[in-house]
Image (spheres, grey):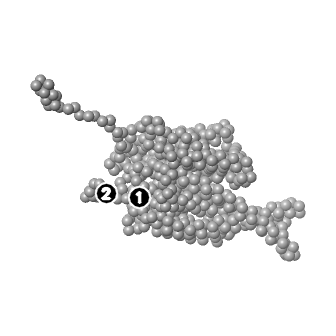
Amino acid sequence: MANVSSSVTQLSEPIPPVIHVSPLPPSYVPPFGKRTVIGCLGILLAVHMAGFNEHVTEIGLSDIRGAMHIGYDQGTWFTTLYEAFNIASMAFTPWFYATFSIYRFSIFMTALVALLALPAPFMPDMTSLCVLRAVQGATAGCLPPVLMTVMLKYLPAEIRVFGIGGYAMSATFGPNLGLPLEAFWFEHVGWRWLYWEVIPLAVISIIMIAYGLPRDPIQLERFRKFNWLGMLTGLPAICCLVIVLYQGDRLDWFRSSMITRLTFWGGAAFVVFLINESIHPSPFFKIHYWRSRSIAASLLSLIGILAICGLLSELPLTYLEEVRGYRPLQTAPVSLVVAVPQLIMLPLIAAMCNSRRIDCRYVLAGGMLCLAAASWLGTSLTPDWVRDNFYVIQVLQAFGQPMTVIPTLMLSALALGPADGPFISGMVNMLKGLANAVAYAIFAALTRRREQYHSTMLLDHHGTHGLALQGMGNPITQQLSVTSPDSEHVARNSLQVFHTYVHEQALVLALNDIYYVLIWVCIGYACMNLILPRRVYPPRAPSPNTPAR
């Protein structure tokens, strides 16, 4: 009986609760309000600051080379190394800001970009300057993926498309504003401010980020599963491929042993990187995204569309600089015609795409047709054109660029769930940076080859029919003969002027050829995006009457 009573007593005592180890708290999403808007705008300003640092120094490279006594070949590495590390860092950024928190990571990288700009004008040699620019490119490349994640994470579903429109500013507004900024800083302030312009913008953006973004916890335990093989193979592979794209045409592609080796070893490392990403439990990329027809089509379209926009922006600037001899200050209005309307067009196109009655694929196709029309108008280019002749072409680009970029980002980003945001963010931003490298390589290769072809044809035509016109006299020699009594001097100057005319005409014909190619590429992309991707609807908040599943 005593045993029975003791057991009853034990049963009557309260049983202590079983305590389980609680999982890590989810990332805090603040209620949408003024602070959230200020934090998002701070990230947007930081991304534009990084973009200005890239485009202003790239456009003003000739002025920087003159001020710092840098040769042409050395100057190409100034841009190449910055772009290589800038693009490579975009691929791995989402893992690091998820580990150190968006708040801390954004502030640190923004401050580092500004601090590295301080000593840039005083570097003692080209090697130290290239190392500094490579590090600065890596830090600047960390900011665009953060912007995409912040816009998709912290904005309510009803206005998330407007966040995508804000992110699209880094691809439409920022690059077209680089030339006017370069003209302003160099002509009115001083060439050192081509580097230092990022400092005041960085200070303002850091204050806005510190005030508006939530302070997520640091998760250093993620380093236990860090993808070391992916980092050690992916980073050099992407850098090698970008260097090949930027230096390939200057070094005559695979006739250069350096380009051949970089392509082979970079391609081999990239294959290992892709295999590792497909099997690693904590990848930087999720390769299976490419199995989706919609995502694959939108990512390929992103590369092509941004490359087309880059080419259409570069063509008039090249003509005005090479043929008409314009300085950046004189060319700035051509870029402003595209840049300034983006402040109105981006919210307008975002509002259109945010309506469930409008299919963003048709908006994309309409934008591609605008770019095709701009290219068609460009085929009328002659050596007599001046700045004003490009304004209609630029206006069509001002409509076409946001109409293509925003729907493409919607098709790639909104087809996935919130958990896939960091993976698609790194992939989209790396491809966005890679599109600029592809545009540069295509433009350099096509311009050089088509210019050489047309130059050969013009000289051959002159050699064939020159004797038939000999009796009519040489108008160049007739005009120069009144300037000097020395016949040999006049003959040398006449030959130089003749070759200048041939060079200008050959370059104009080469740019015409590129415009013709872009017409059909734009039409092809318009048709492809009407067929391949499935429709993506703008996000909406779940209804409170929706039953839980």
Of the 4 image quadrants, the one containing the N terminus is: top left
Residue 27, given in percent of the width and then of the height, sits at: 37, 43
Q: Which mark sits nearer the N-terminus, 1 or 2?
A: 1
In this view, which residue lies farthest toward the top?
Answer: 2
Residue drawn at the location 38% of the way across and 40% of the way down: 216
Q: Nearer the viewer, residue 414 or 110?
A: 414
Q: Nearer the viewer, residue 223 or 467?
A: 223
Q: Is residue 213 above or below residue 157?
A: above
Q: Is residue 549 above or below residue 23?
A: below
Amino acid, disc 1: Val
How many marks are shown on the rendered structure?
2
Residue drawn at the location 49% of the way across and 50% of the way down: 286
Q: Nearer the viewer, residue 159 or 90?
A: 90
- Which residue, given by chain and number where applicable, does mark 2 sit on? 542
Residue drawn at the location 42% of the way across and 57% of the way down: 414
In this view, which residue lies farthest toward the left?
Answer: 1
Comparing labels 1 and 2, the label whose residue is closer to the camera:
2
Q: Nearer the viewer, residue 251 or 34?
A: 251
Residue 361, given in percent of the width and then of the height, sits at: 46, 66
Residue 214 sits in which quadrant? top left
In this view, which residue lies farthest toward the front?
Answer: 1
Res 297 visible: yes
Residue 419, given in percent of the width and then of the height, sits at: 41, 49
Q: Secondary structure at mark 2?
A: loop
- Which residue, given by chain and number where applicable, does mark 1 sit on? 161
Residue 427, given in percent of the width and then of the height, sits at: 51, 51
Residue drawn at the location 66% of the way across and 62% of the way down: 319
